[in-house]
Amino acid sequence: MTDTIDWLERLELDGFVERTVDGVQTTKRWQAAMSRAALQMYQYGETLTDLRVPIAAALIERYEGLDAATLADAVALMLKIESAELARNIGKLS
């Protein structure tokens, strides 16, 4: 991987996010990766109180060998996308 990655473009090309009229949302492919990561962590006894942890695990599953700074950039972007998506979905429940 290169030192500089446009994570939004990369994640879109890999089918993990898609652009919509409301912004960016995750795809079923990303949701499956997150589910696998969360299940594995739960089986290892993790309490899963920090959304960044399964996000990082899902990214590492796909992008093996990332350095810490690059991984942190990707996690920050996916946390922002996931948080916005959760807020939109919670708003729909009200």
Image (cartoon, rainbow, N blue to C red):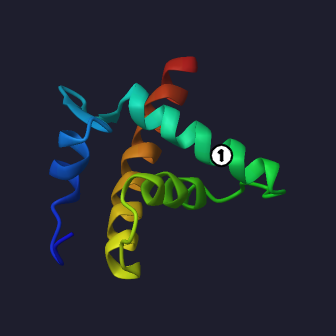
Give the residue displayed 54% in from the left and 42% down from the top: 34
Where is residue 45? Give x, y as percent.
84, 57
Numbered label tally: 1
In the shown orientation, is residue 24 left or right of residue 63?
left
The amino acid type, in three-letter code, at marker 1 is: Ala
Where is residue 41? Give x, y as percent.
71, 53
Is residue 94 in view from this perspective?
A: no
Give the residue displayed 50% in from the left and 40% down from the top: 33
Q: Quadrant of the N terminus?
A: bottom left
Is residue 89 in view from this perspective?
A: yes
In the shown orientation, is residue 21 left or right of residue 26?
left
* Depth check, front residue: 71 or 51: 71
Q: Quadrant of the C terminus?
A: top right
Where is residue 8? Give x, y as percent.
21, 51
Where is residue 10? Give x, y as percent.
20, 51
Give the residue displayed 18% in from the left and 41% down from the top: 13
Tell me: residue 89, above or below residue 23: above
Give the residue displayed 51% in from the left and 32% down from the top: 32
Q: Which residue is mark 1?
A: 38
* Depth check, front residue: 36 or 84: 36
Which residue sits furthest top? 93
Which residue sits furthest right? 45
Tell me: residue 20, above or below residue 56: above
For label 1, the SS is: helix
The quadrant where residue 70 appears: bottom left
Q: Residues within 10 Å of mark 1 (few under 14, many from 20)?
A: many
